[in-house]
Image: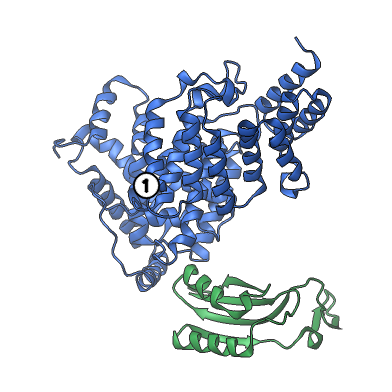
Chain colours: A blue, B green
Amino acid sequence: MEGRAAESSAEQYSAERCTDESVEASVEAMFREERGRLLASLVRRFGDLDLAEEVASEAVEAALVHWPVDGVPARPGAWLLTTARRKAVDRLRRDQVYAARLAILQVEAERADPASPADAGGDLPDERLQLFFTCAHPALPADDRGALTLRCLAGLTTPEVARAFLVPPATMAQRIVRAKRKIREARIPFRVPGTDELPQRLPGVLQVIYSIFTEGYVASSGPRLQRPDLAEEAIRLARILRRLLPGEREVAGLLGLMLLVHARREARTGPEGEIVLLEHQDRGLWDQAMIEEGRGLVVAALSGGLPGPYGVQAAISALHDEAVDVESTDWPQIVALYDVLLVLTPSPVVALNRAAAVAMRDGPEAGLALLDDLAEEPRLRGHHPYPATRADLLHRLGRLPEAAIAYREALDLACTEPERAHLRRRLAEIEQPG
Amino acid sequence: MKYMLLIYSGAGDSADACSFEDWVVYDKALKEAGVLVSGDALKDLTTATTVQVGPDGERTVTDGPFAETREVLGGIYVIDVPNLDVALEWAARCPGSRDGGAVVVRPVDEFGD
C-alpha cells in the first residue's frame, strides 16, 4: 500500500515517528477525532456501542502496526472502518447468539429510522450527530452524559475522563458501564431527532457540552481553579457539532460563548493560581484571535430571529472582551442583554448577574437594592457568588463591617481553594487596611 | 421491543383532569399504530389486597396497601415499539402523564431475546 495523498494528520504522523519515543501517545491523540467518526459509523452499522468501541480500538491498534511499515493508506478513515468492520464480523461469527441479537436490533433500527446518513465530506460519512444525541439522552443520568460524550466523541480514555472529573478511574469505569448498559437494555436509539423534536432535544446536547466546559473552568472542588484541558475538549466538541449543524444558531452561540470566555484564561489567574477579577485582569493577555472568532459566532447566533440563551450570553461576553477596561465597558448594553436573558431563562442566578451589571451602570447602591430583593431566593441560598457580590458592593460603599460579614458568609460556601483564597484576601483588606 | 408504561395518578384529582374520552382516543391511537400489546386500568387502591409468604411458609394477607405516597399506580400498558424514543413519545401522549400524573417507562425483560 502506497502512502500517497496522505492527509495532514498522516503526514504529521510520519514526521513525528522518527523523532519521538512517545509516538504511540501522539498517534493516539491524533486518532481522537478519527475515532469518534469511526465509532459513529460502526454504531450505525452494528447498533451496539460496546462492539463498536472494541473493534474501533482494534482497528487503531492495527493501524499502529501496519502504517509505519506499509505506509499510510490514501483514505485512512476508510481503511480504519474496513478493518474494524472485518473484526466485528469475525467476532459475530464466533458468537452466534450475540449475532442473532444484533440482527434483531438492526432490523428494528431500520424500521425506526430508515433515513440514510448524510455525507459531510471527508473520506467517511460523518455520522457523529446521532452519537451526540445518544450520549446526551435525557434518559441517562445527568452526571454520566458528559462522561460518555467525552469518551465516545472526544475520544478520551476512561482514565482520562476520570481525571477530568476528579473521580477515581474505577468509579468512572462503573459509571460508563452503567450508562452503556442502559443504552443497550432500554434500547436508547442511535438516531438524530426529527426536525419537530430537535428544539426539545438540542438544548440537552448543548447543556452537556457547556457543563463539560464549566467543569473545566471552575472545578467544582479541589485545589486547582482551572482545568483547561476540559474547557478545550468542550470547545472541540462544540466545533464538531457546529460543523454537523451549521444552521442551528444556539450551537454558534454556545461555541462563541465558550471561546469568548476561554480567551481570558491566561489573565484569569495569577502566578500562584489565585483568582484575578475581570477588573484587574491584564487585557493584553487575552487571546485576540479567539475573541475575533467568538465575535463572528455572536453575529451568527443573533441573526435571523429570536436569540437563544447561549447567543445572548455570548453577546454579553463579547462586550466584556471588546472593552479596554471596566470603566469603558458598555454596561447599559450588558444590562439590556441580561434583561433579555431573564425573559428567555428566568432564574435567580441570572438576576444576580444582572444586579452586578446594574451596580456597574448605576452605582453600588442600585445593585445592592436589587440584591436585597433576591435575599429570600431559595436557589441563591448556599450559592457563594451571592454573598460575595453583596460583600463587594458593601465594600465599595464603605460599609465595612457589613462587607466583612458577607465575605465570611461567602467563605463558608466557596468550594475551590483559589476562590476561598480570593475571599480571604478581600476580607483581609477590610480588617487590616493599608 | 416491549415496554411497560406504568401510569401513576397525580396528587389531587383536579377538575381539569383528563376525561374518559381522552383515554378512549389514546387507546384507539395505540391500536391503530399497531403497537398495543395489552393495557389495563386498575380499580382504586381501597380494593387492593397484599399477600406475603414468610420463610416458614406462613401466609399473611392484608388489606391495602394504602397510599403512603401520593402517587398511585392506576394502570398499565404494554407496547411493542422499536426503541426508547418511540416509547417515550407514546408515554408523553398518554393522558396519565398530565395533570400532575406520571408515566414510568420500563423495558420488558424478554428472556431468550
- The spot of residue A168 in percent (x, y) is 61, 38
Is any part of residue A384 visible from this angle?
A: no
Q: Quadrant of the N terminus of chain A?
A: top left
- The spot of residue A124 in percent (x, y) is 25, 50
Q: Write down the chain letter for disc 1.
A: A
Mark 1 crowdedness (10 Å alpha carbons): few <14, some 14-19, many ≥20: some
Identify the residue at the far front of this view: A362
In this picture, residue A226 sits left or right of residue A15: right
Q: Is residue A268 above or below residue A235?
A: above
- Residues A55 and A328: in front is A328
Amino acid on which disc 1 is placed: Arg
- Residues A251 and A155: in front is A251
- The spot of residue A249 in percent (x, y) is 40, 50
Q: Is residue A384 above or below residue A399?
A: below
Q: How many marks overall?
A: 1
Q: To which residue does mark 1 refer?
A: A242
Is any part of residue A49 visible from this angle?
A: yes
Q: Quadrant of the C terminus of chain A?
A: top right
Toward which corner of the image does residue A64 lie, by quadrant? top left
Identify the residue at the far top of this view: A434
Q: Which element type, helix, strand or loop, lies under badge 1?
A: helix
Toward which corner of the image does residue A111 lie, by quadrant? bottom left
- Residues B94 and A327: in front is A327
Taking the spot 75% from the left edge, 32% from the top edge, the residue there is: A410
- Residues A70 and A317: in front is A317
